[in-house]
Image (spheres, grey):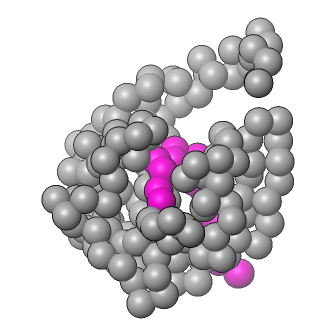
Amino acid sequence: MNPLPSEVGEGLKAAFRAHPAGVAIITAAGPDGPVGLTASSVSSVAVDPAAIAFSVTRATGSAGAILAAESFVVHLIDDEHSALAEAFAISGSERFTPAQRWSTLPTGEPHLAEARVALRCRPIQTVPVGSSTVVIAEVLEVIPGTPGRPLVYFDRRFHPLP
């Protein structure tokens, strides 16, 4: 069981509620089928080699399957996918339904072709930090999609940018 956040931890959460962040859906082929989660912690790390980083808050469920996967796909999504981001943010929500229009890449990962861009990655390092894990991943392939209105996570909600 995680201890309650400290006063500084609570202050950090409040600070980042007022700091907009891009939204991504990260997917992988898990041992029991496709898995995915919503992340607002994705950032570019380097261009040579091409690398990104993100964090997950637990090593169970979808996050655990993504941490164990040999490869995964980071979908940078737009406003038209805000309901999908909600579904992938809530444990137990319906995911990978025909209505959501997922397909499978030749390499086996779930892919949302309508995402602005998808980054097929492989983990190169993980760093445990308290109850979270930071993942540093090499980008193996950049798959362009359909651009739309950008989506940001701000004050615990998804918002489109004009």
Which residue is more in the foreground, 36 or 44?
36
The magenta segment: 35-52
Quadrant of the frame with the C terminus: top left
Determine which quarter of the picture holds residue 49.
Answer: bottom right
Report the number of discs.
0
Where does residue 16 sit, x and y in percent of width and height? 59, 27
Residue at coordinates 40% horizontally, 71% vertically from top-left?
110
Specify the quadrant of the image occupied by residue 58: top right
Query: Which residue is located at x 51 percent, y 65 percent?
Result: 32
| Residue 160, image x, y percentages | 27, 40
Left or right, 130 with reference to 25: right
Is 38 contained in the magenta span?
yes
The residue most toward the front is 32
Name of the residue lying farthest toward the left: 99
Residue 109 position, x and y percent, is 46, 76
Q: Residue at x 69, y 65 (%)?
A: 68
Quadrant for the N terminus in the image? top right
* Image position of 30 with respect to 148: above or below: below
* Residue placed most toward the observer, 141 or 30: 30
Q: Position of residue 48 (x, y in %)?
A: 70, 81
Q: Report the magenta stretch's main SS.
A: strand
17 and 60: which is toward the camera: 60
Q: Is residue 53 visible?
A: no
48 relative to 15, above or below: below
* Residue 89 belongs to the span the image colors magenta: no
Vertical placement of 49 versus 94: above or below?
Answer: below
In the image, taking residue 147 as reference, residue 33 lies left or right, namely right
Please say whether residue 33 is visible from this viewpoint: yes
